[in-house]
Amino acid sequence: MNRQRKHLEVSHVESDSEFNGEESAWNRQSVSQVCYQALPLCSRFFPYVALLQSLVLVASGSFWLHFPPTSSRIEQFLSILAKCCESPWTSQALTHAVRQENLQGVRSPPPPSGSSSPRLTCSQCSTLDSGTDRPLIKRSTAPPSPCPSTLSCNSTMSYLSLGSEVSVCPPKALAMVNRSRQVMNLDKSDGEQARALFERVRKFRSHCESSVVIYKVYLTQTISKLLLAVLILSYTVPFLSSLSFNHICHLEDDTFVGYATFECIHVLSSLMHKLLLAYLTLLGLFGLLNFYTLSWIFHSSLQHYSFHKKEKKSESLRDVPDLTNDLAFLMHILDQYNPLLAQRLSVFLSPVSENRLLEESFERRWGEEKLRAMTNVDADGCSRLQLVALPRLPSAVFTLTQLRVLKLEFIADARFTAQMHNMTSLRELHFYHCSPSVDSRALAVLQERLEVLQLTFTQPSQIPNWVFSLHSLRELHLSGRLNSEGGVGRGWALGSLRRLGNLRVLVIRGLLQRIPAELCEVAGSLLTLEIHNEGTRLLVLTGLKRMVHLTELQLQDCQLERLPSALLALTSLRTLNLQHNNLRTLEELLSLVDLRHLSCLKLAYNHVLALPNSVGVLRGLEILDLSTNQLKSLPPALFTLRRLRRLLLAGNLLVELSSEVKALQMLTELDLSGNRLETLPSDLFSSCLQLQVLNVARNSLGSLPCGIAALSRLCRLDLRSNSLDELPAELGCCLGLCGGGLLVENWLFLSLPPHVRDFLSQSYTTSGTRAEARSRPESDSFPYFSPTQWRFSSAPESQI
């Protein structure tokens, strides 16, 4: 029997034989099954293999986005990037950068005409992001500004095109550059959000730069994708010849069909051929893309990102530090996507941008209104302002035209600019542990106006050099660890004080061992010299001999044991203060006979055992302070000082007061508190009629002599802590004691007659208060208290 070959399709088999319906369906199914089993395995399962390969490639391509150590960093990076693009500070910082670059372009000379470098016209200086489908960028509805110097504050993203250079704008635009200095001011919430974003970027940077996980995972992923593509192509291409959708199948049993051989064609054969070619083409392109990516990774240094090496970057990015490791790799990836996004992120990587934000927030907080509210006005009408522990000096300080005294304490960055010419009333500056910097124009203002300067420092090197060029300075106070070796002795050896030609007062608080020879450079103008040596012994005082014009000299806490011989040359001296020393003898007082102008001698807080008769040579003395010594008696020569007005002898060992005190008829203040007196001479009240202050507290007085009513000028009397049993009623005749001038225990005060108590307890009238205020003298040992304070202070003592 001749067997014939017929063309059949797998999905439909035609037969010329006539069968009934059921037999035809069964035969068709049998032929299709036989033909499907006859297909080669590669042809039969190729669609499933291609689908599986595609899934593997997709999984390997997005592995780094789902791997926990890398996905968390990438998500955080994208979140920070979105916040950077949305922040108003980004717009402000880029606008400021554009303005600075434009000004630099205006100041720089124009390039030669033959230059082929691209330039921007003024109308092209500002560009907005041309991308319309960037997910991280919000476009502003405001139209672009015609010039970068006039960028709109409403524009959220305004910046220079990174592919061009700034050109010189026309004169009108230059005028707008000079006039438009207003920058978009952030409100408080935006400023806090920007500061928080700076901190977040800083933490993210430190976290990413500590490892290279993302880089390694991306490199491994790229290599694996390339190997997969090569592997798939290596076993797919050889099977191309065996892939066929048109084949011959033979039936073993042709009883029912009538044919033994069939030529079967797949119903989607043409489509499958096209899909096979497209799949292989895409797979080849996928491999080439991964090969290019791998070559880019190895050719570029992706673990280091520098804004300085970017030729097309703006000048505003030059201060951004270099990035390393994972953050550098992410920045390279971001540059491949959109370089403009890297510029926005760089705003929060720039230390200059952060400093500008802090400065603006600081200036907003310390505005002119707040500084004026902090300004105090003393009794003399002098306005004073004190600023403590600020990071910098507020610029609003320079708008305080009425400020006379400015005190700065612990100011980290105190800069005085040319705006100081607005402070027309400034005459006094105090610097406490801060080293201010002064530019040339501000220095000219200080040289012309400043009269008083106080400096407190730790090391002499902290004294600014410009201090010694203030030729109008009249008072200079230096407080710190000055010493003869590393401080005044060496630091001023170049004669820096020579320019202080108008210096009148010099106060030094340090650890000097000698009088610096450099002080002689201002000996011609210096009138007052104060040295507080903080317990360090002052050994060499020969430098005082050249300061012949001194009228006041204070040597406190210098551990002096005798009166310096250098005092003989100070013939113009009026006040000599040697308090807080170790003086034990005053035999050298005789050598002070040539100091004819000496009117004030303060020797308190020493160890003087006896006052010599040579004190009588000081005929011009008006104030003598010998408080807190060890005097047991007073020489008769003391009472020959007819001009003596204040005699302070508190805290000694005096047992009696000589009646010769009556010779001191000009005496206005006598302090005998803290001694061992049992009686007072009656001549004290009958002769010293000018006495206004009498302090005999903490003695052993049993009674007061008669005649105290003669002291009509007496306005302060301290009788506390004595052995008095009663008070004389004649105290009511001392009109100055009215209203609190008498300080005594409450129970002792009640011993007075009622009308005297009422008189002494009554308050001053308005006119009387003013008159008494003028008549009450200043007293170091007897401070003034109000009547209420007198009574409160006496109540506890009465209980004792």
Image: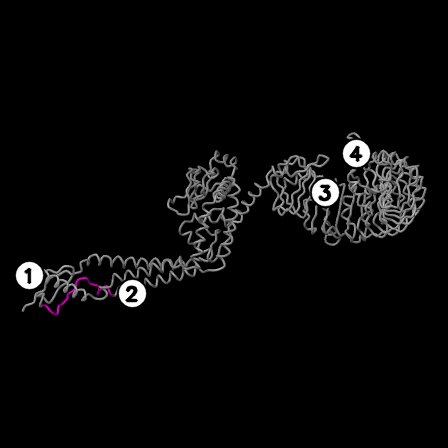
Residue at mark 1: 18
10 Å crowding of disc 2: few (<14), some (14-19), many (20+): few
- In the displayed structure, would residue 129 be above or below residue 63? above
Residue at mark 3: 499
Q: Is residue 252 magenta?
A: yes
**Which three-letter amino acid code belongs to the residue tagged 4?**
Ser
Residue at mark 4: 763
Marks 2,4: beta carbons within 8 A: no
Residue at point 43%, 46% (across, down): 162
**Label of residue 234 in the image:** 2
Marks 4,1: beta carbons within 8 A: no
Q: CA distance from mark 4 to mark 1?
A: 144 Å
Q: CA distance from mark 2 to mark 4?
A: 115 Å
User: Magenta region: which residues?
Assistant: 239-254
Mark 4 falls on what kind of element? Answer: loop
Q: CA distance from mark 3 to mark 1?
A: 132 Å
**Label of residue 186 in the image:** none
Query: Which circle, 2 or 4, is nearer the viewer?
Result: 4
Q: Is residue 20 magenta?
A: no
**Which three-letter amino acid code belongs to the residue tagged 3?**
Arg
Q: CA distance from mark 3 to mark 2?
A: 90 Å
Point out the tag, 4 or 3, that comes first from the N-terminus: 3
